[in-house]
Image (cartoon, grey):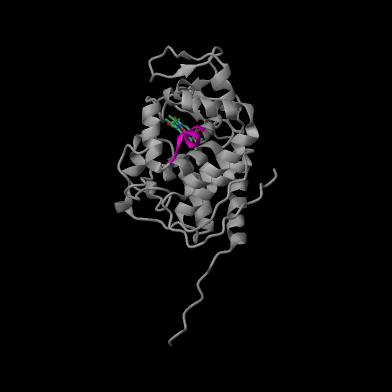
Amino acid sequence: GAGFSPKEFIPTKEDYAKIYEEIAKRLEENEDYDDGSYGPVLVRLAWHASGTYDVETKTGGSNGATMRFQPESDHGANAGLKAARDFLEPIKAKFPWITYSDLWTLAGVCAFQQMGGPVIPWRPGRADGDISACTPDGRLPDASKEQKHLRAIFGRMGFNDQEIVALSGAHALGRCHTDRSGYDGPWTHSPTMVTNNFYEILLDEKWNWKKWGGPAQYEDKSKSRMMLPTDMALVKDREFKKYVEKYAKDQEAWFKDFSDVIAKLFELGVPFKQEEKWTFKVVDA
Ligand code: DDH
């Protein structure tokens, strides 16, 4: 009769904490992937889901998780991210009430924290969209370009110079794969640990063009680390370089700024009902 409806399940912070813990556990159980962790590719999934945002049209962003669909899953920039989406399927199956949009960003937060990064505030509220909300190709950065392109792409999301440099330090993590982006190699010698080493080596190492048949990229003297043209733009540009110097000297300053800017990235365009942001505890190995 009137006023009678089945009770809706309203998840609490504790319910989301259980998902965080489950992702952390799954990360530990799958240390045979790549350099020893799915962490970097999970961070990249959350970033590419969010980085399609356009402030003017208010389209794109993490709300919607439209990378589940073609054509967005087939955009060149998203090559290889199926590994991250598939990694999260058993979690989605176990907790079907969480949206993909919330799950992907929460997984980015979890992966980053579990790899030694700063705590990142997060809140739920994203709804999954349908195929019609897929964003056009070309919204994510093109690694072959330089500072003008970086300011255009990240400006479209609403980020300034300092925020661009702070976000770019995520390249302390992970690597390039020839069968995904065409580029090759890791940026740092500790690709599964969050450190400010990306900024340190960008300034301190000598970077030369790699001589090979692949896309133009830089390598260090030992040929064990790489930089993309867009990474190198951060020290070629005087305004960007100020912040590279700051973060190279002061890991804590970068941790603080990164936490702020990645939280902002993951929330672009999301119509939250909940004001409060939550933080989740790192799960010890
Ligand atoms: Fe990135 N990134 N990224 N990136 N990124 C790649 C890998 C990873 C660019 C290009 C590439 C950010 C910014 C930029 C991560 C996080 C973030 C690869 C290699 C390319 C190419 C992909 C592959 O072959 O598998 C460019 C260009 C930019 C830019 O112009 C600024 C940002 C802002 C983030 C972030 O997380 C905030 C991570 C993590 C990886 C490693 C993935 C992996 O599988 O390992």
Left or right relative to 280: residue 56: left
Determine whether 250 is above or below 271 in the image.
Answer: above
In the rendering, at what x and y percent does residue 134 appear? 32, 48
Q: In the depicted view, which residue is nearer to us: 40 or 159? A: 159
Numbered-mark total: 0
Closer-to-camera residue (139/225): 139
Residue situated furthest right in the rendering:
284
Residue range (magenta):
159-165
Q: Residue at x 62, y 35 (%)?
A: 253
**Foreground: 239 or 218?**
239
**How would you classify the magenta stretch by its main secondary structure?**
helix
Q: Position of residue 20 (x, y in %)?
A: 59, 51
At a point 51% along the width and 45% down the height, the residue shown is: 87
x, y percent for residue 282: 66, 47
* Magenta span contains residue 161: yes
Q: Is residue 238 above or below residue 38?
A: above
Q: Is residue 156 magenta?
A: no
- Could you tell me which quadrant the C terminus lies in? top right
Residue at x 53% of width, y 13% of height: 206
Q: Is residue 186 visible?
A: yes
Residue at (34, 55) in percent of width and height: 130
Location of residue 141 (image quadrant): top left
The image shows residue 45 at horizontal and vertical percentages of 46, 42
**Residue 38 visible in the picture:** no
Where's the N terminus, which quadrant?
Answer: bottom left
